[in-house]
Amino acid sequence: MKKRWILALTLAGALAMTAACGGKKEAEANEAPSETEAETGGSKSKVVKLGNYKGVKAEAVSTEVTEEEIQAEIDALLAFYPATKPIEGKTVIEEGDTVNIDYVGRMDGEPFAGGSSQDQGYDLTIGSGSFIAGFEEGLIGKEIGNTYDLNLKFPEPYERNPDLSGKDVVFEVTVHEIVEFVDAEWTDEFVAAYTEYDSIEAYREGMKATLEAEKVQNQPAEWENRVIQAVVADTEFDCDAEEIESIKTNIVQEYEMYAAFSGVELGDFLKYYMNGITEEEFYQQAAERAENQLKSQLVIDAISDAEQITVTEEEYQEGLKGLADQYGAESPEAFEEQYGRETVEAGLIFDKTVDFVVGQAAEL
């Protein structure tokens, strides 16, 4: 089950998925399909002809960090912390404007924790929904260089801080400037302000070491993924469109949840955390990932059926204990009760099947 989870994470990646049918290079290297037809549980999708899964060849996983990968990290950092400059001649706030403000929130005349910008200046886009209802709307029509009181009420419930739910609040807001975002400059000063490093050189060295460590850690899982994708590329499927769409919906909801946790809309989350891909690109990649996940599961199930892979009672109990320890369950019995023996056993068979295929694989 651990391997099953790792494989799912690897398939997810950063939504930089390969096409669902895999690479031509791996497919050509593994041409030796067997005539098989298998279905997964109650799924309408099935494997029509299972590709070769013995002695699979896949491209080796490199742990070398490229200049392009370091530059991608730099570009993402610059996009996350853009610079701003005042818009000359614009003095009255309108919907969609970005304003630089400072604010202090008071209840019963007293400031409360977390309710102030602490004179650091805050760039707020009007209409973004970043603040409670009435805050952004209350600034429309206001002029720069002035201070205003906004008499508001926290929503009820207020999930970010339940203690504030439904309470009256007055925000004293000073409007400094109406600004526009511009590209930040990659300087030592920028690095020192927004990272743990004090110079461009130190950042590049540190990021290279970080990325290399991540690659080394992820290498086994990525190798397993490449081997399975080589089998997927060599296999013929009959996939149900509704099942793919259902998986895609779950993927989209997952990333919408990540965006909500980050306090931003999905489009901004993709911009700041996903290397700036567009929503159109995201939905396309989510569809590819959904199809790929379904095909990977079908392939592994088909192989386990073809090889009649099962787990003995001893293997089951050992695996159950390992999962309980890994996920901090009270006991193996509690873990089994939570997920059910059928689910645990299916995960262990999944792992054993992946080990069977990967154990015979070789690098191209």
Image (cartoon, rainbow, N blue to C red):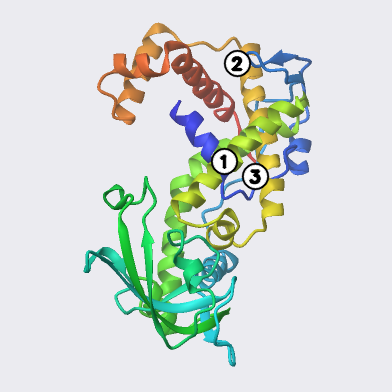
Above or below, comparing residue 364 to residue 305 in the picture: below
In percent of width and height, residue 189 lies at: 41, 84
Identify the residue shown where x is 71% and y is 53%. Answer: 280
How many C-alpha atoms fall within 10 Å of the one at disc 2: few (<14), some, or many (≥20)? some
Q: In this orientation, which residue lies closer to the viewer: 201 or 323?
A: 323
Name the kind of residue labelled 3 in the image. Answer: Glu
In percent of width and height, residue 310 lies at: 51, 10
Say which of marks 1 and 2 sits in front: 1
Q: Which residue is mark 2?
A: 304
Name the kind of residue labelled 1 in the image. Answer: Gln
In percent of width and height, residue 73 lies at: 52, 66
Q: Which residue is mark 3?
A: 59
Q: CA distance from mark 2 to mark 3?
A: 24 Å
Position of residue 37 in the picture relative to residue 342 (left or right): right
Identify the residue shown where x is 60% and y is 42%. Answer: 252
Whichever of callouts 1 and 3 sits on the residue coming sooner in the sequence is: 3
Q: Quadrant of residue 239?
A: top right
Kind of element beneath mark 1 = helix
Q: Is residue 112 visible?
A: yes
How many C-alpha atoms fall within 10 Å of the one at disc 1: few (<14), some, or many (≥20)? few
Above or below, comparing residue 88 to residue 24 in the picture: below
Q: Which mark is residue 253?
A: 1
Label 2 with label 3: CB-CB less than 8 Å: no
Q: Quadrant of the N terminus?
A: top left
